Image (tube, rainbow, N blue to C red):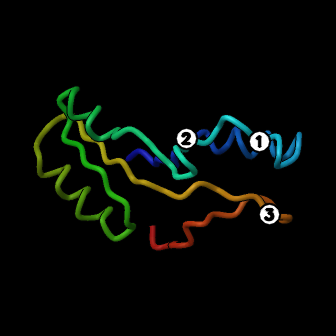
Amino acid sequence: MVANNAGWIAIRDLQAAVYGEPRAIGAEFLKEGAPISPSLAALAQAFGCHAERISEPDEVRPALERAFAAGTPRNSIQRLTQPQILCSQGAQSRDRDTRL
């Protein structure tokens, strides 16, 4: 399982904590303000893995079941997540679903 938050968000959070939010630069993968990311599932498939890309928490269990049923020795599931946002009480997730 690969959690993909479209950036190096931990690095961005450290930059913001040390230098201030305006100095947190170059750690988010954005194009015209929207997050972008390569399909890590497609990359895993190129290496012979059963792989898929999901975006909702309720897709995790079915994706894992498909991965185990695939019978391949290597599996990968890319879970798209929301980047962390900073607030006065530390980093809090925009992805508020706690079912995982």
Q: Which residue is mark 3?
A: 87
Q: CA distance from mark 2 to mark 1?
A: 13 Å
On residue 29, the disc is: 2
In front here: 38 or 72?
38
Vertical position of residue 92 compared to residue 49: above or below: below
Q: Are marks 3 and 1 in contact (CB under 8 Å)?
A: no
- Furthest-top residue in this view: 47
Measured from the top left, where is residue 31 in percent x and y?
Answer: 52, 44
Instruction: Give the quarter of the figure containing the C terminus.
Output: bottom left
Give the residue drawn at x 18%, y 50%.
68
**Helix, strand or loop at mark 2:** loop
Q: Which residue is mark 1?
A: 24
Between tags 2 and 3, which lies in front?
A: 2
Q: CA distance from mark 2 to mark 3?
A: 20 Å
Q: What amino acid is at disc 2?
A: Phe
Q: Are marks 2 and 3 in contact (CB under 8 Å)?
A: no
Measured from the top left, where is residue 8 in percent x and y?
Answer: 61, 39
Instruction: Bin the neighbour count of mark 1 within 10 Å (Cα to Cα): few under 14, some 14-19, many 20 and up.
Output: some
Q: What amino acid is at disc 3?
A: Cys
Q: Earlier in the sequence, mark 3 or mark 1?
A: 1
**Helix, strand or loop at mark 1:** loop
Q: What amino acid is at disc 1?
A: Ala
In the image, is 45 to the left or to the right of 37?
left
